[in-house]
Structure formats: C-alpha cells, structure tokens
C-alpha cells in the first residue's frame, strides 16, 4: 500500500500450496487448471509475509504480524461481512474469480513444484494465492 492505495502484490515465499490428499475438489474448481485430483490449495489469499504484514500496537509498542494468524481472520471477516452462509460458500470465490471481486496476484513464487501453477503466480488461479486477494465482499 502506498498512501492507503493498493500498489502491488506478490507471492510470499513462505506461502503453502498444493493438492489435498483427502478433501474432494470443489465443483467450481473444475473450471481452473489446478492439476489436482482432489481439492487445490489455496482458495483465496490475504496478507501473509511477516515482513510486510499488518501493524499492531501491543502494550504501547508497534509490531508487524503476518502469516496464517493474520490472513485467516481477514478472510473469515470478509466471509462474515458478505453474509453468505449457504452450503455453496466454498465455491463462491471460484464462481466470482476473474472479476472485480478479486485482485489477481500474478508475480512471485513460493518454491519449485512438479506443476508450475502450484508454486508460481500466474493469471487466474495459482497455488500460492488461489483466485487472488479480496476486493470487497462481492466474491464471498
């Protein structure tokens, strides 16, 4: 962010990605080239890098936090604000991907994988960032 305006996003090198060995693929994932027989991870993304995370004041001092402890509550709050509690909720971001509802993260990598979309950012769905970061609650 620069002056409160989103400037760019890139994959955090510490982000996880890949295919679930257990969870069935979401029906809406079939329109994306995930390369996974089961559910692909991740679905969506939020700030994760602890070096560029969110600032938090604790006991009078400022700290920067990132990772799942920051991104999971952010995504949970976006779902809550959207008010979409139906059984189709997990598919919802995939059904609204590529629209103004998400910022598509298209640069960076979190490592090397047998299939490049699992570790490398690209247009559309990719393993490290899913369908992107929220641009409001419309994708949820």
Image (spheres, helix red, strand yellow):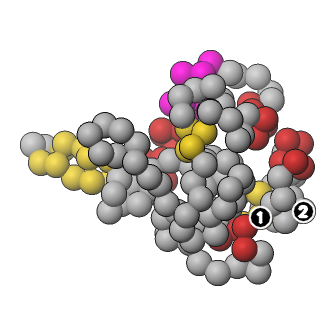
Q: Position of residue 84 (x, y in %)?
A: 68, 21
Question: Residue tagged by mark 1?
Answer: 19
Coordinates of residue 131 in the picture (x, y in percent): 67, 48
| Highlighted range, magenta | 76-83
Question: Can you give x and y, in whole percent of width and height, for residue 71 in the image?
Answer: 48, 47
* Placement of 91 over or under 86, stated as above or below: below
Q: Which image quarter: residue 64?
A: bottom left
Residue 97 horizontal side relative to residue 45, left or right: right
Residue 106, image x and y in percent?
59, 59
In reply to whether residue 15 is colored magenta, the answer given is: no
Residue 81 within the magenta-colored segment of the rendering: yes
The overriding secondary structure of the stretch rendered in magenta is helix
Let me know if residue 15 appears in the view: no
Compare residues 106 and 17 and report the one nearer the observer: 106
Contact, CB < 8 Å: mark 1 with mark 2?
yes
Q: Which residue lies furthest to the left in this view?
A: 60
Task: Please report whichever mark, 1 or 2, sits nearer to the chain's N-terminal start.
Answer: 1
Disc ID at residue 37: 2
Q: Nearer the viewer, residue 12 or 89?
A: 12
- In three-dimensional space, the C-alpha distance between marks 1 and 2, rounded to whole angstroms, equals 8 Å
Q: Is mark 1 on a helix, strand or loop?
A: strand
């Amino acid at each position: 962010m620069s002056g409160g305006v989103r400037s760019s996003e890139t994959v955090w090198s510490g982000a996880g990605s890949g295919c679930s060995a257990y969870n069935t693929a979401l029906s809406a994932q079939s329109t994306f080239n995930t390369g996974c027989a089961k559910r692909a991870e991740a679905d969506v993304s939020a700030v994760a890098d602890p070096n560029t995370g969110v600032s938090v004041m604790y006991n009078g001092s400022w700290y920067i936090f990132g990772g799942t402890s920051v991104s999971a509550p952010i995504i949970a709050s976006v779902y809550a604000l959207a008010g979409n509690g139906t059984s189709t909720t997990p598919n919802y971001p995939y059904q609204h991907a590529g629209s103004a509802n998400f910022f598509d993260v298209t640069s960076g990598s979190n490592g090397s994988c047998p299939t490049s979309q699992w570790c490398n950012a690209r247009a559309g769905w990719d393993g490290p960032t899913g369908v992107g970061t929220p641009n409001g609650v419309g994708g949820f």
